[in-house]
Amino acid sequence: MSLRTAFLLIGLIVAISTTMAQSDIYGKAQLYNKPADGYRGIWYHITGAGQAGSPSAEYKYKYSGGLGTYPANHYPFSVYAKAVNKTFFCYGGTDETGKTLLHMVSYYDHKTGMVPRPTIVLDKATNDAHDNPVIQIDKEGYIWIFSTSHGTGRPSFIHKSRLPYDISEFVRVSATKIVNGEKVPMDNFSYLQMYYSEEEGFTGLFTHYEKVGGRVIGWMTSKDGVEWSEWKDLSLLHQGQYQTSGNRGKRIGTSFNYHPSRKVRGGLDYRTNLYYLQSDDFGKTWITADGATIELPLTEVANKALVHDYDSEERNVYIADLNFDKKGRPIILYITSKGPLPGPGHGPRMWHTAWWSGKEWVINDLAPAGNNYDAGSIYMGKGNRWVIIAPTAMGPQPYNTGGEMEMWVTKNQGKTWKKVKRLTEKSIYNHTYARRPIPVHPDFYAFWADGHGRQPSESRLYFCDHKGNVYQLPQKMKGEFAKPIPYQPGK
């Protein structure tokens, strides 16, 4: 055998070994790094609307529709990069068959007003929108995509752009975490909210699934996105919690509910109560809104983090967003209802804000809600204005997830609200999950998708500016770049 042949054989063996190792890591998933020909969101549903003949059965699904920016426990889906004047975003996309979840990345160029073809980073080998990605950008401009998993049945991934501010190619990050003092692979995490500081690096809030404790909420940190800390738990209440968080400066706040362990109004469908904790040092210590220290993880339902006892009122709690006023005081946007089923039977549903005034939690109503999963976002406007963008009007599939997007404003911390604009109207599909970027650029203010509430359908992606002008991302592109399409009612 010649020396050249030997080297070729060695190269072939290494290539085969690398491919097999990659296959083992990804399982059924597949790294793509290919441009798509347009913007198509994932359509997804969860059953549980009730048995045939029940009042809620006509709505078919507990929640459903175009869920490319779902759920509220994933954040962020978009990040503005001032250095290049672009808002980078990710979403749960799909191909023309609609049968698989594709993790998509793109950007809006604020200078040109155009978008490129989105990049398909990963085929997640599922159609479950709970596996949707989230995005962050580090201080050097590298784009990070965190691919979550719904439970422990599928692997999770972290990918990083090969070049700063470039979406053309992503490489897998072999992330580790600390368990019992040793580094082990970090290849599974759920419901991720990821924040970044140039000084501290990454802080992630997430869920991990345990046989005892159910859906446990916790946090982790990493200076470089590769080596992660030991996972620390925030709460161990009954069957677990859902958390939705926000960030302002050095402050990270998290709001959450809990799933009672009992036969009546218990289990995952009866999430209730509203809690809040915050950290001013990126997870090193956690306190309540009034600054009181608290022992973690929480183990008692009645504790100092409790904002309001909705359990005693037999109300479910669904948290949509958390932001901070200009003094750093938290504002939580959420919906309450009588139960999990869609339709008027488990109504009335109501949008609320809970604001920490500096002395107490002040809770106010915003507007009636049609579905438990009508998610939107809250913003700090000019002066003392708060702004909400959410699907607060009934859509073409009433009582299913989403509706028509509207903009609301308050000038008195939520005491009274004024509807200032209907962003969508006469739609053929429900719009839902309007998500706020980090930070917010006025030209790319909210990002969401639409989809039919009662049957599988296409799903289109949209964004709006701070004035409420709506644009659709092109479903089919002929060139490498395209202008977003001004929204037209009735489409």
Image (tube, grey):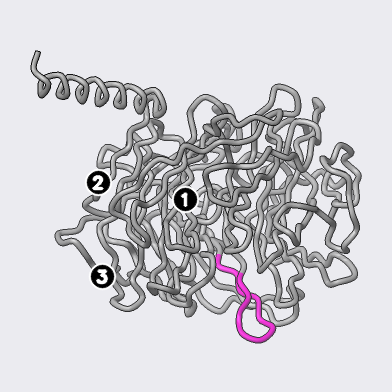
Q: Quadrant of the N terminus?
A: top left
Q: CA distance from mark 1 to mark 2?
A: 35 Å
Would residue 280 be found to the left or right of residue 136 on screen?
right
Tag 3: amino acid: Lys
In terms of secondary structure, where does tag 3 sit?
loop
Real-space Cα distance between discs 3 and 2? 21 Å
In magenta, the rendered stretch is 379-389
- Compared across the picture, whether 205 is left or right of 306 comes to left
* Residue 483 numbered tag: 3
Seen at 49% across and 56% down, the residue is 136
- Identity of the residue drawn at 31% across and 72% down: 486
Residue that carries the numbered disc 1 in the rendered image: 397
Image position, residue 159 (x, y; %): 42, 44
Q: Secondary structure at mark 2?
A: strand
Viewer-proximal residue among 164 and 41: 164
- Which three-letter amino acid code belongs to the residue tagged 2? Lys
Q: Is residue 78 magenta?
A: no
Q: Are marks 1 and 3 in contact (CB under 8 Å)?
A: no
Determine contact: label 3, label 2, CB under 8 Å.
Answer: no
Residue at 41 percent across and 67 percent down: it is 87
Vertical comparison of 471 with 193: above or below: below
Classify residue 400 as left or right of residue 313. Answer: left
Q: Which residue is mark 2?
A: 34
Residue drawn at x 38%, y 72% is 84
